[in-house]
Amino acid sequence: MAEVLRPEMLDISNDTSSLASPELLHVLAVDDSMVDRKFIERLLRVSSCKVTVVDSATRALQYLGLDGENSSVGFEDLKINLIMTDYSMPGMTGYELLKKIKESSAFREIPVVIMSSENILPRIDRCLEEGAEDFLLKPVKLADVKRLRDSLMKAEERAFKNIMHKRELEANDIYSQLKRAKI
Amino acid sequence: MQRQVALIKQSLFDQGYLDEQFMELEELQDDANPNFVEEVSALYFKDSARLINNIDQALERGTFDFNRLDSYMHQFKGSSTSIGASKVKAECTTFREYCRAGNAEGCLRTFQQLKKEHSTLRKKLEHYFQLARQAGPKETARRPK
């Protein structure tokens, strides 16, 4: 193992910009209520997440570059790990926002969590069917946020390890080829 | 002084003005953010004053658009829940029930009661936060035993 060539020297892509450092999960929170925005922002910061809060689904789409006004150029560096949205909002609902995100090739992999003060089973089912990661009843608990964060971090770690393992295999492979070539 | 603050807080819980959600908010305070609960509270009263105004105007028109009233009350209930304003939240629930029943008289009556509870809570919380600040920041960041 000590003789594995460093990836940089082998011209293997060293692009880690698509991987978030585990401590800095970036969450986009969407809620039309001032009080709830302040609350969710605090919950997320206490859970060591980077937070962006917006007050409507429309603004969320603008932020993601999905509003049709902007092309996706310039949004490649935007790394969002999780979207948490209120369900009942004037204009576009959280459910409609969820659908738009799942329709987008750039953002459909991002987990979307719906928050609602109303425990309506058909609503919950509809959201989960549309691909929501989870449905949280308001008021959201710190324990809920920590649970989400932990499961996301595990997923990111797994993805990171997979890539590192792949690189190791590639490096080993090239090293063996070089060794054989010298003989 | 600190004991007085703790007693006031305990009585707010015992008398049902506040519920566990208020404690959850306090858990989020720390030395770097010692005034978080007071800030949320200020936001709540600013926001709810706006809603009360909207509802007052809607009721004054006398046309009783129950859908619209219910929508305002949904917002009111939401933020009241988030801050742990238990009695105000209960009045919101009652109001919404009257909306669904199309009961204008019930709505008017409940709204008067709601405004009373809201005003009482604001005074009590203002008093509490004022004392808490005088007593010293550390004490307010703890849960009541």
Image (cartoon, coloured by chain):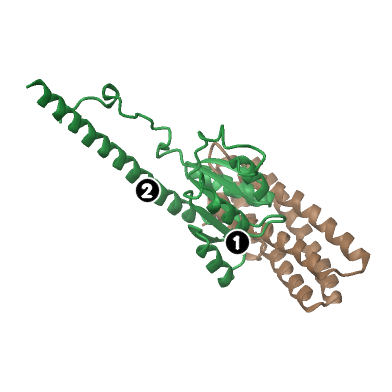
Chain where mark 1 sits: A
Q: Where is residue B100 in the image (x, y as percent from the top left)?
A: 76, 75
Chain where mark 2 sits: A
Q: Position of residue A55 (x, y in %)?
A: 67, 47
- Alpha carbon of mark 2 to alpha carbon of mark 1: how far? 25 Å
Q: Residue at x 70, y 68 (%)?
A: B90
Number of numbered labels in the structure image? 2
Q: Which of A158 and B88 is in front in this view?
A: A158
Q: Nearer the viewer, residue A168 or A156?
A: A168
Q: The green chain is which one?
A: A
Residue B109 quadrant: bottom right
Within 10 Å of disc 1 (Cα), the crowding (few <14, some 14-19, many 20+) is many
Judging by the rendered image, the residue that carries numbered circle 1 is A116
* Residue farthest left in this picture: A183
Residue contact between numbered discs 2 and 1, judged by CB atoms under 8 Å: no
Of the two numbered discs 2 and 1 on the same chain, state the one appearing first in sequence. 1
Judging by the rendered image, the residue that carries numbered circle 2 is A155
* Residue A182 badge: none
Q: Where is residue B91 in the image (x, y as percent from the top left)?
A: 74, 68
Q: In this view, does B50 lie to the left or right of A119?
A: right
Mark 2 belongs to which amino acid? Ala
Q: Which residue is drawn at 56% across and 58% down?
A: A114
Secondary element at tag 2: helix
Q: Nearer the viewer, residue A172 or B100?
A: A172
Q: In this view, does A102 lie to the left or right of A163?
A: right
Does residue B141 appear anywhere in the picture? no
